[in-house]
Amino acid sequence: MTIESIKELILHMTFILFPVFIYQTAWLSRPFKSPPSRNKTLIYLLCAPSAILCITYPLHIVDDLSFDLHSIPIVISILYGGPLSGALVILTVFAYHFYTGGYWLLLSMITIPFYIILPYYLQRKWFFYNKQRKMMFILLIGNIKTAVTYSAMYLTGTLGLTPMIFTGNNTITLVLDWLFLMSALFLSQYAIEYIRENAMMRYQIIKNEKLSIISELAASVAHEVRNPLTVVRGFIQLMGQELQENEHKNKDYFELVLSELDRAQDIITDYLNLAKQQYFEKEKVSLSSLLIEVDQLMRSYANYKTVTIETKINSDLVVYGDNPRLKQVFINLLKNAIEAVPDFEGKVFIRAYSSHEYIRIKITDNGNGMTADQLERLGEPYFTLKEKGTGLGLTVTFSIIHHHSGTIRYQSSVGEGTTVTVSLPIQSDVQ
């Protein structure tokens, strides 16, 4: 390898990694109210120039045949930007090859459709894979790309459409090209995942700081207010028992006072639940049994609301967690779903199954749904769509799932209902 080849390799890595850091600066460094999302347009606008620069300044030359790493921005745009961003980058590459001419247009038209099959298959579940599995798939994609490219070169070279490079003198160069591609893919993937993890960590730190302040306030306020309320409620009950039967008006007042005192107790309970989130006692939990128990507990409430509940819960779903806290999570989510649907025609569907390294619990309702702005604010303290409520129930729910190394995601649109998906790591033998 010559000094010139090393310079070209460094230049190529700059073309590939510089857009990654621009994306970090322009998008992921911003303050987020909800978990950082991807900007598909920006991904295309960064990956397309990166691919073009890789083509324009090739890595090295063998018998007048250029080698470059433009396949890496294509793969990244598909996996992280989605199918549309990837397709636009591919069209941009084709257009640039067509403009510049040469045999690389033919090779790209032959090779690209083959090595993008796996990225397109993986992109839908890409963000659910752990880092190790992503690295494994990235290296597999690199090997597929290399095999397809070399096969196309040999075929077109045999037919006389491109220069024949498969000679004894060029074998070492081809091996080096494969090493360059695999190393660049590995570094690019590592840099992207590292930046994404930092962005998520910053968001979580800010969120935890807010929750910590609220938790301290909740503990002090709840402790000071709950005891006097309990005493007041007791005396109101005693006074109500001594009322004469003909004093209906006063009796209505007493019932109103008692109901408002009960609502104050519920609010304080929400604050206390929020304040106690740092205490967890984890053990092996049968999530299948827990979900069946929650379903049975909430059936009477659903019947009272004339709401139909359907379940499809796989057996042998096991997680490592705090049983009472997880039970609190699913009671809260199921109660919200029941209250969100219309009476008589309301339907709630619970589905639980294992997928890859996680257990997915999906609760779907046919309620009114939510707007995009409302979805972004779910889980914020004091934000609620109910007439009476503090919004702290979902805040506690999000916190519990986070402490179990899980995720909770909402999908909803106005008039089409809501689906909440809880993902929890599957119980392993070693903890």
Image (spheres, rainbow, N blue to C red):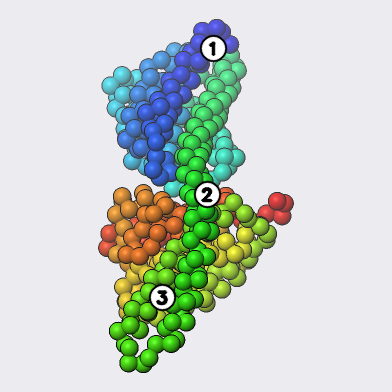
Q: Nearer the viewer, mark 3 or mark 2?
A: 3
Closer to viewer: mark 2 or mark 1: 2
The residue that label 2 is drawn on is 216
Task: Give the alpha-carbon distance from disc 2 to disc 1, as whole Å.
Answer: 57 Å
Mark earlier in primary sequence (2, 1)? 1
The amino acid on which the numbered mark 2 sits, given as a three-letter code, is: Glu
Quadrant of the image for the N terminus? top right
Residue 171: horizontal and vertical position, in percent?
59, 19
User: In the rendered structure, which amino acid carries the disc numbered 3?
Assistant: Leu
Give the mark toward the camera: 1 or 3. 3
Q: Residues within 10 Å of mark 2 (few under 14, many from 20)?
A: some
* Label 3 SS: helix
Using a 10 Å C-alpha cutoff, classify the residue at mark 3 as few (fewer than 14 neighbours), some (14 to 19) or many (20 or more).
Answer: some
Helix, strand or loop at mark 2: helix
Mark 2 vs 1: CB contact within 8 A: no
> Where does label 1 land, which residue?
6
Q: Where residue 118 sits in the image (x, y, percent)?
A: 48, 42
Q: CA distance from mark 1 to mark 3?
A: 79 Å
